[in-house]
Amino acid sequence: MNILSLFILIPLLTIIAIMFTSNMKQTRIVSAVGMGIQLILAGILVYLYLSERNAGNMDAMLFYYDAVWFPTLNIHYTIGVDGISVAMIALTSIVVFAGIFASWMVDFLYREFFISLILLASGVFGFFISLDIFTMFLFYELAVIPMYLLIGLWGSGPKEYSAMKLTLMLMAGSALLFVAILGIYFYSAPAGSQLTFNLLEIAKNHIPIEMQRFLFPFAFIGFGVLGALFPFHTWSPDGHASAPTAVSMLHAGVLMKLGGYGVFRVAIYLMPEAAHEQAWIFLILTGISVVYGAFGAVVQKDLKYINAYSSVSHCGLVLFAILMMNQTAMNGAVIQMISHGLMTALFFALIGMIYGRTHTRLINEMGGLMKVMPFLGVVYVIAGLASLGLPGLSGFVAEMTIFVGSFQHTDTFHRVLTIVAASSIVITAVYILRVVGTLLFGPIKNDHFLHLKDAMWFERLSTLTLLIAIAAIGMAPLWLSNMINFSLGPIVEKINGVATVAGLF
Amino acid sequence: MTGSIPIQYFLIISTLMFFIGIYGFLTRKNLITMLMSIELILNSVNINFVTFNKYLYPQNLQGHFFTLIIIAIAAAEAAVAIAIIINIYRNFRSIDVDNVDQMKF
Amino acid sequence: MVDYTYTLLIPLIPFLLFIFIGLTGHKMKPIVSGLIGTSGLAIAAILSYITAIRYFWTDHIGVIGYKSIKAFEITWLHLTDKLTINIGALIDPISVMMLIVITTVSLMVHIYSIGYMKGERGYHRFFAFLSLFSFSMLGLVLATNIFQMYIFWELVGVSSFLLIGFYYEKPSAVAASKKAFIVTRFADLGFLIGILILSFNTGTFDFQLLTSPTGPAITMPGGAAFMGMSVLTWSLIFIFMGGAGKSAMFPLHVWLPDAMEGPTPVSALIHAATMVVAGVYLVARLFPVYALGAPDALTVVAWVGGISSLFAAIIACTQTDIKRVLAYSTMSQIGYMMLALGVSGYGGHDGLGFMAGNFHLFTHAMFKALLFLGAGAIIHAVHSNDMKDMGGLRKYLPITHATFLIACITIAGIPPLSGFWSKDEIMVAAWHHNKILFSIEYLVAGLTAFYMFRLYFSIFWGKATHYHHTPHEAPYVMTIPLMILAFGAVFAGFLPFHALVTSDGMPFESHLDWSIAIPSVLIALLGIGGATAMYMKANGLPDKLAGVFGNGYKWAYHKFYMDEVYLFVTKKIIFRFISQPVAWFDRHIVDGFMNLVARTVDNTSNLIKGFQSGRLQQYGYVFVSGAIALVLIFVYLWNF
Amino acid sequence: MNSEIMFYLLAGMILVFSVLTVTSRKILRAAVYLLFVLISTAAIYFMLEYTFLAAVQLTVYAGGIVVLIIFSVLLTSHISEKAIMADRKQSLLSALAVGAGALLTLLTILRFTFVPSALPAQTSTVTDVGNALISYERDGFALPFEVISILLLAALIGAIIVARKEKDGIIATKEKK
């Protein structure tokens, strides 16, 4: 049995097990155990991966397995991982694990809730291990659909509206994506030979530049919608605001990363020439995302909206760095995906916990919470500091890799854009400190808050898992960075090797 | 027995009958009269079948049999339709087609 | 080569203390966390002193000039083929000097805080933060490369933020901490941009490579890149922007006076002695690049320093909050240091300014920490920051009074105390370089003496104020650090800095220039005299003088309305004119567009749904006309 | 000549009674007019020498269906009740569409040249018809015959179920095959 298939199998087994549980306690224990195994498995995967690499295995993809499941169109179940996917899988299992504990107290239709949540997770895992773009797309859809139910049923506020909006916008993205995938498929092999969806096979073939020009925007925007690309990001604030805690965590933490990962794996990797030609348009858009999201977050009143806009800004940075198309910036993009995934999941978990106590998410109505819930307060401050790029926490590593990498671009236009994007770190400081200052510090605004309890054990477990991961990356980023770099090398070479057109500027 | 009557004459009759039937179907409000209009339409078609059979392919009887079967179907259709109409009448106390618009949107 | 790997421990000990106290502090008795923190820092201080003695004297016998030594270095993050972020320890004269300054002041502040913070909530938190700060600051000065410096630069900023906002239930403290962080963060953006430009053009972060006269930075081809200045100049100006932010140089100084909301020991440590001189240290660290590669940038440094010192000195004369007076005084003194670096050349006697700047940094750390700690003792006794609430305190607080007086004399520049020696060197350097700056400094020297003694007299002399309960002297745990620092303030001036800390590592001869020293002393005495006349006994003179200056006084009292300008920029421009429109734009235009799409689909389907009317005859009609139309089109109109 | 006169007569009857069927305001009368149309059609079948078909037309259509219709008319409305006619707009629009359609079809018919076959006609006596109906060879209609029988059975059952009076008055299912 290939270890990667376990990543899909274990969630499915967990789901089956959940169906047989009879009360809330059993359900959540089963979920926690299942996802705990998944987390351990991710740890084993990282270990196996690194030892394979150390043993000198230079294959692009490790743990490769291939089986055809729809011969007519030559669709395969092809799986395999490189450093980037391993990192993303590790991120996913951490976030899912924390998410289970963050939703410990869900009592409405709890069985269905955990089933949908884990189904979503299995879709994400499937996406990251797939090398067949059709299967990848399939898993992507598998991840998006439970989202609708999760927000629509367990959400808060205008949840039907938000669920509908989120799902429709993502589906619109999928539609674009599907066009791109089919287009790639029809040019995936030289005329006359068997067409394929296999990423590695397609990469060997050269898609005609005219087709690339046509298909690249589809692929980029299709994935970009999920990655909160301006101006297709508006599902994010509403969706996150309405979603239940664990879903916000998973969505902002992991699902939005599918966008960045997809852009990287499909759009840019398979269509590098068009990427070079059109990068400037999308660079401007993502540059806007970065700054605009940050400014947007400054005046929001709802905690979740603030975080959603900050996600727009940070995810914009991911796409921005990927579009720079050099190794350092792309490395930064992957680290940023992981870092932002952990950070934002932590934020949403904390917001959920605070909301569960104060029953409000409006920062004006809260204040001085540090005094009544010191644990949550401290973790919130640390999460905030990570978000504004404090050295020693993951955000800094990611941002600096991106900025230094982007600035190595020989083109002045790119360097100027980098400076513009870098200016977002100031704005980030403004909104993070505004939240921290109003929410946690200052006098207590409402006497009712005085009786609130600090975090319970499962909440501590949930936040500490994420926090440790953030600090680990922040303090010792080298192993992660090297793991990613190793796999990035050949990819960047391919992307830039065929670059005949240097771009417009 | 048809003598020198050209085929077109039959076709013209059936065409006119067909469109009269359609007109009836479009304008009559009573479900039963609409059903009658449909019978007209079926009849016109039958005439066509028979005529074509007679004039163009007299060696075969396909048109003839088609007509025969259509008549059988028309009978079945009429029976079911009237059953439905009676049911509608029972539910709505009316067989005005304008009242029967529950199946909208 | 001597092994200095153990210097790694100097920052590492406070770091471990931070983790330890931070995680377990709430479980132990408050005093225990204080003692652990203090003793840890004492070890770090001892290690620093050992390092200093070894570096400057024992390991140095028979060698001329000080080399910079990379004691330790590991790769922290791999960026590109050429650029890696390393973490390590660089030992050279200025870093060793800074080690001494930081560990000494920090240790004094630790000891002092054991008494000062007694009974406060979050006692252990305070010590954890202090350790974090010490760690960051020590990591900053030991940085082997500019990126490590940036990393610790940020950490220092955060510790400062945490400590200013220590009393987090006080809205003003929260606001001040936010302001400090955001203003310095803005400056750090400049720093980062500078680093990016510099590293892009030189391909290295490493200080040794950057500052080497044959290194890629200095030998970089000049030529105007943008607005008549070279790329190197621009990058250095950007880097200086970071330094100016941290060091509260005009116009990025607005956070410093507000930062006084933090506990007073914090002000002494961070906002007087160590963190605020990080900017000076940054310029000193890159000094060869400034001096040899981009003299234009150095001119900017000099002028910013000069203007800041004058600006701050004027404001200091009008403030009544004693900590704010000291804050402006700090800003003014750092201006001096910047100016000293700005007027310096590279190598030999030309590098007098460099030496003087560092010298002044050193002495200033001693006497300014002393002043702040003294102010802390006073506040501790009186429970007020405002000098209007004070007066005649010399009877109640004898030790504080004595040490405070020493500090005042030192800062005023009266020989033979340390302030005189370092300030005099700066005057000399400025005289040789630029007469205008020189005269500014003369003026500032007088103003400094004036406002310091205004402060001194208002607190300890003046009208006899009635206190609710009799003020009493602070406990020994607080006064002993005062005495130690007073000792430092008196004798630090006799250190042979011109032999130890020089721009190129080579010692040079330096002697007192009496033609400059005597007038400066006289000006200082004039300032003291003025203050004595006005404030020793309560009289109407100050108000009259304020009346003479009229609007000038009002402007200075309101700090030249810099806060209002900043408030205008942040509240009006960033909030009102950027963020709110952006948020509005997002909700109504971008999202509105998406909703419009949704609504259009909705409306269209409503429209189409009309066809599904349930009316049989309508369906029939549409069907028939459609069929007819199709026949018409395909049989008649579309002639195949 | 006789047959031509006969044809014109039948054609006239068909047209007139058709029009009357769809315009008469009294439903019972409309049903009777329909009867005339159907009989006239049967007559046309006679003219075309399909006597069996004509007979079926008379028995099933004129006899069965019309009677059924008349019964249901009696069940659902009063004899004196006048049917509500469509409004002017609907009539006009329908007339327009129908007119256009008729015009178009007639045009097509008249422009097309039909070539009558000269082959001898197949007789359609009852024997012929019966043989063809049970023959499964070429030109045999055994399969349609069987299918139609099943359809009739289904319609029979369906009609009973649909029309049956339910206790709660809710239409159960519409068995329509």
Image (spheres, coloured by chain):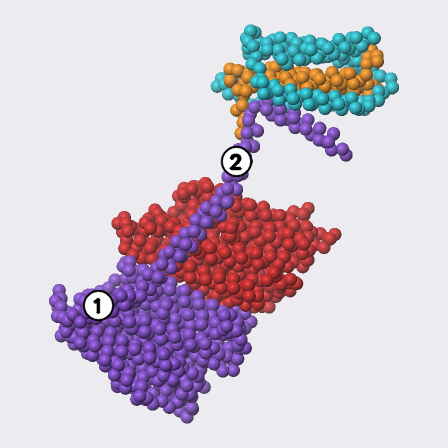
Q: Indicate whether C482 appears above or below A35.
A: below
Q: Residue at x 55, y 63 (%)?
A: A413
Find the distance from the CA under tag 2 to the CA under tag 1: 73 Å
Q: Indicate whether B73 appears above or below C235.
A: above
In the picture provided, is C6 more to the left or to the right than C258?
right
**Residue marked by disc 1:** C547
Work out whether residue A297 can be spotted. Answer: no
**Location of residue A166 in the rendering, given as x and y in whole percent from the top left corner:** 49, 45
**Residue marked by disc 2:** C603
Is label 2 or label 1 in front? 1
Chain D, colour shown: cyan
**Location of residue D174 in the rendering, given as x and y in whole percent from the top left corner:** 58, 22
Chain B, colour shown: orange
> Which chain is the one coloured purple?
C
**Location of residue D64 in the rendering, given as x and y in whole percent from the top left corner:** 66, 11
In the picture provided, is A495 more to the left or to the right than C350?
right
Instruction: Determine the image quadrant of residue B37.
Output: top right
Chain A, colour shown: red
How many neighbours does mark 1 have within 10 angstroms: few (below 14), some (14-19), or many (20 or more)? few
